[in-house]
Amino acid sequence: MHWDIVWQNFDYFLWGAFPQGPLGGLAASILLAALGIFGAFWLGLAAGLMRLSKRIWVQIPSIVYIEIIRGVPLLMLIFWFYFLAPVILGRRLPEFECALVALIVFTGAYIGEIVRAGVQSLPRGQMEAARGTGLSHAQAMTHIILPQALRNMIPSFVNQFVSLTKDTSLAYIIGVNELTKAATTVNNRTVVAPTEIFITIALLYFVVCYVLTSASRRMEKHLSRYQARGR
């Protein structure tokens, strides 16, 4: 076994060549996931609310977006943005930006469905009661429905963040120096310790995802107690 190679390169697994070079490794994976979930939240929120609209011309773009993206593998979406961006924009986007856009678009479709399901899970009488007080549909959705629905969606958002963190490993295919790419680089350079390297990488992914999953469980318990007190 060659665990010494792992220890010698452990800082590279964590943050790449930073600060002498670009941020990489696990830090780049977490940054990619954090920016991805932030952008996907707003895109998914818009898509979910559009899908709930009673206007068919508002619904259709959301339905087309959600159904197409959910039916396409993430890896294919990454390739689309990587190879089509130069054709559409006339220049090649940096690999990190291509991966980020693909992750936002991909995850946004799933968050759109989370938003739709979260809003529809609330009793219909709440909207009717809010409208009865003189609020418009938009005001009732903004001030009454969405705050309750979003609170209930928090565990689902965290779970989606966990999935997105694991999905960042696909960005290595276009050269983003995230954790999997960092491991592949070290393995190609040293050759003799692939088992030790990829066991280490798996453990790093596990630790990050376990922390996030544990946070999701605590949120679910907290929300359950909150809802029980509300009754």
Image (cartoon, rainbow, N blue to C red):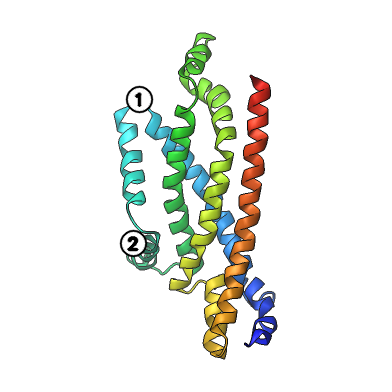
Residue type at mark 1: give it.
Lys
Residue that mark 1 sits on = 54
Q: Position of residue 120 (x, y in %)?
A: 45, 28
Of residues 220 and 105, the one drawn nearer to the viewer in this rendering: 220
* Residue 167 visible in the shown view: yes
Please, what secondary structure does the residue beneath circle 1 have? Answer: loop
Q: Nearer the viewer, residue 126 or 220?
A: 220
* Residue ID at (49%, 18%): 127
The mark that comes first in sequence, 2 or 1, is 1
Residue 88: mark in rendering: 2
Indicate the quadrant containing the N terminus: top left, top right, bottom left or bottom right: bottom right
x 67%, y 30%: residue: 225
Answer yes or no: do the residues labelled 2 and 1 have beta carbons within 8 Å? no
**Is residue 24 in sight in this rendering?**
no
Determine whether 73 is above or below 3 in the image: above
Residue 146 on image: x %, y %: 54, 29
Q: Alpha carbon of mark 2 to alpha carbon of mark 1: how far? A: 34 Å
Q: Position of residue 6 (x, y in %)?
A: 65, 82
Q: Is residue 133 above or below residue 193?
A: above
Q: Amino acid at mark 2?
A: Ile
Sort mark 2 into few (<14), some (14-19) or many (20+) by Cα contacts within 10 Å.
Answer: few
When asked about the image quadrant of residue 79, the answer is: bottom left
